[in-house]
Image: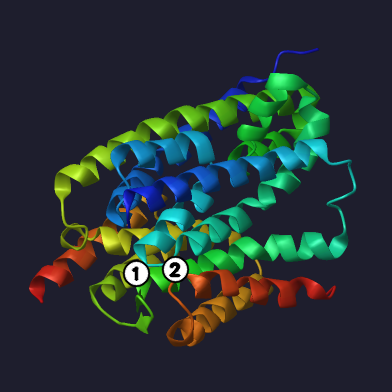
Amino acid sequence: MSSTTAWIVLASTSVLCFSVKLLGYYVPQGWLAHPRLQRVNALVPISLLSALVVAEGFVIKTHVVLDHRLAGLAVALAALFAKLPFPVVVVSAALTSALVYHLH
Amino acid sequence: MTTPPRETFRDALSVALTVGAYGVAFGAAGIAAGFSVLQTCLFSLLTFTGASQFAAVGVMAAGGGAVSAIAAATMLGTRNALYGLQMAPLVRVKGLRRVAAAHLTIDESTGVALAQTPRGTHAMRVGFWVTGSGVFLFWNLFTLLGALGAKALGNPASWGLDAAVPAAFLGLLWPRLTTTYLRVIAATSMVFALLVTPWLPAGVPIIASVLVAVLGGWRER
């Protein structure tokens, strides 16, 4: 990633995310209240976060790959089932993944 | 107007500190994706909506294009517009204060505000502002610490940072999976994203997964 690309991503993301926030304060009440829009919008974070889990965990460029990250994610899943707090989930995943990475 | 109960402050501050601490993970993810410490910190100051920030740097880390990164982040941020719609009649501010209120409109400030409903409007308003500014303070502080820490560590894979990012996404997703239907949507999105991965440019499968949300929400159930 070039420095220019990084700045473009940063600036565009910031401007667009802020505009979306501001939109909620300026559109007349009811505009965004359409039931279909509400239902879809409630599911968008679920779909995107799910896709991000697998895209970050099992993909290199455009290939599906199972590597050390799988071990980390398995531990993260176990930690979530055990109702452990978020930092524990992330750190235990990182440590497990690093361990497997070094063993290989 | 009554003074807001101490419970409101306690709720707001405990949420602010806990969520703010996640900023360490974002700081590390930003560096692992190839952003500088300054850029990573600016994300937290200017974008200030966690899942979108993780998405933007995550797509870039996965080798995706800038457009995919920006689109994924923006779509994840659309829920903030619906939060704003709920918070606008509550905070009732104009001008610069409204801009500040909009910037602080995120999952946590909205959540704490709505949780104060039984304690009255004043408590809700206090809950919104204290949580929003508290998260802002801690999120930015911990982003800086995470970014500096990751910078000092070096190779992301060597420290497991490449697994920390998907684990963070899983941690953000987990509490949202409250019904069987939502779990089905999550699983379908995961399978769909993996299936289309070989056929689409890097990062695009993430955006394409919104299709699952659209189909899943199209009809009333």
Q: What residue type is labelled 2?
A: Val
Assign the N terminus of chain A to one quadrant of the image.
bottom left
Question: Foreground: A63 or B158?
Answer: A63
Q: On the image, which quarter does residue B152 sit in? A: top left
- Nearest to viewer (mark 2 / mark 1): 2
Which chain letter matches label 2? A
Residue in the foreground of this view, choosing between B56 and B171: B56
Q: In this view, does B179 lie above or below A11?
A: below
Instruction: Look at 81% across and 12% down and name the residue there.
Output: B1
Q: Going by the image, does B119 lie left or right of A102? A: right
Q: What element carries label 2?
A: helix
Instruction: Name the spot of residue B3 as percent of width and height, x first.
Output: 71, 13
Locate the C terminus of chain A by quadrant: bottom left
| Disc 1 residue type (three-letter) | Leu
Q: Which residue is drawn at 79% across and 59% down?
A: A38
- Tell me residue B19's x, y (percent): 47, 40
- Horizontal side of residue B74 vs A93, given as left or right: right
Residue in the image at 65% along x and 70% along y: B182
Write down the residue under mark 1.
A73
Q: Find residue B67 and name its label.
A: none
Name the residue at 90% across, 48% down: A30
Is B66 located above or below residue A25 in the figure? below
In-front residue for pair B130/B215? B215
Outermost left residue: A103
| Subunit of label 1 | A
Mark 2 = which residue?
Answer: A53
Q: Earlier in the sequence, mark 2 or mark 1?
A: 2
The residue closer to the viewer here, A98 or B30, is B30
* Quarter location, residue A102: bottom left
Left or right position of A2 against B184: left
Q: Distance between the residues labelled 2 and 1?
A: 9 Å
Q: Is residue A79 visible?
A: no
